[in-house]
Image (tube, grey):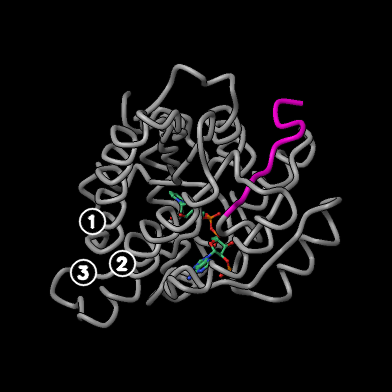
Amino acid sequence: MRFKDKTALVIGGNSGIGLSTARGLSEEGAKVYITGRNPETLAAAEQEVPGLRAFQADMADIKSLQPVLDVIREETGRIDSLFVNAGIGTFIGVRDVTPEIWDQVHNVNLRGAFFTTQSALQLMGKGGSIVITGSIGSKLGMPGNVIYSSAKAGLRAMARILAVELVQEGIRVNVVSPGPIETPLINRNVGMDPAEVDGLRQQMISGVPMKRMGEPEEVARAALFLGSDDASFITGVDLYVDGGTLEL
Ligand SMILES: NC(=O)c1ccc[n+]([C@@H]2O[C@H](COP(=O)([O-])OP(=O)(O)OC[C@H]3O[C@@H](n4cnc5c(N)ncnc54)[C@H](OP(=O)(O)O)[C@@H]3O)[C@@H](O)[C@H]2O)c1
């Protein structure tokens, strides 16, 4: 019960890693709020997770979070643990990248993540924790990954600056960076058909020393650790949950 009497907000909490994190937070006693875009999976999360409240808010639209924050302010008055997890994928070769698709991904994965965090800070203070979902893609030279990789590398840099500025206020900021994880994200990479997705999955598995995809729960457990007081002396780190991919 590491989150007993705590309030948690998961941005992108209606699918994959975020939903798994929201479940874990609830099981460990938190009052959990989530955001996402898809009304059906938002409603399903409310049904599944006792006490969870779900809101539609597009991370690319930086004003859309304020109504959610207003509800949290009224109901609990603060956010103890913020999980900035929403993200979209893309695989496009350098020569085919357009400004439109670049902006589509960066507006969510980097710009959206920053302004979401900035906005949520109005409800955060001493003892608070922010966990940002990065990716090992920020460090790998993977062909086709220029847009996503640069957004996630930007997130990692952003988290470092947030950590050093917010340490004065008693707020910790960390990144959890998954390797290949079996979630709906894999199947909805912007610009890929199902056969290409399967080829990508096999390619990713071959690069993992554990020779398998990870499960969303395996990332959620790391995020919950970083978001809890168990990680009270940890700030500014990037924790890889990748079956050994980056370090072995
Ligand atoms: N799966 C992997 O292999 C992998 C590897 C490295 C990093 N990651 C990162 O892990 C995070 C979670 O991804 P996942 O694998 O769990 O994929 P997922 O199942 O597709 O979940 C993505 C989540 O982000 C939300 N989201 C996407 N765009 C949004 C927007 N504009 N506004 C608000 N919410 C938005 C989605 O909500 P809707 O469904 O409502 O849009 C969903 O809840 C992402 O940041 C991703 O980049 C994943």
Residue 23 in the image: x percent, y percent?
Answer: 74, 45
Pointer 2 or 1: first along the chain: 2
Q: Residue at x 70, y 76 (%)?
A: 39
Q: Is residue 229 above or below residue 82?
A: above
Mark 1 element type: helix
Pointer 3 or 2: first along the chain: 3
Q: CA distance from mark 3 to mark 2?
A: 16 Å
Q: How many marks?
A: 3
Residue 103 in the image: x percent, y percent?
Answer: 28, 75
Which residue is tagged 1? Answer: 150
What amino acid is at disc 2?
Answer: His
Q: Is residue 136 left or right of residue 51?
A: left
Q: Residue at x 79, y 35 (%)?
A: 29
Find the magenta span and give its range.
1-10
Pointer 3 or 1: first along the chain: 3
Res 220 quadrant in image:
top right
- Is 2 within the magenta? yes
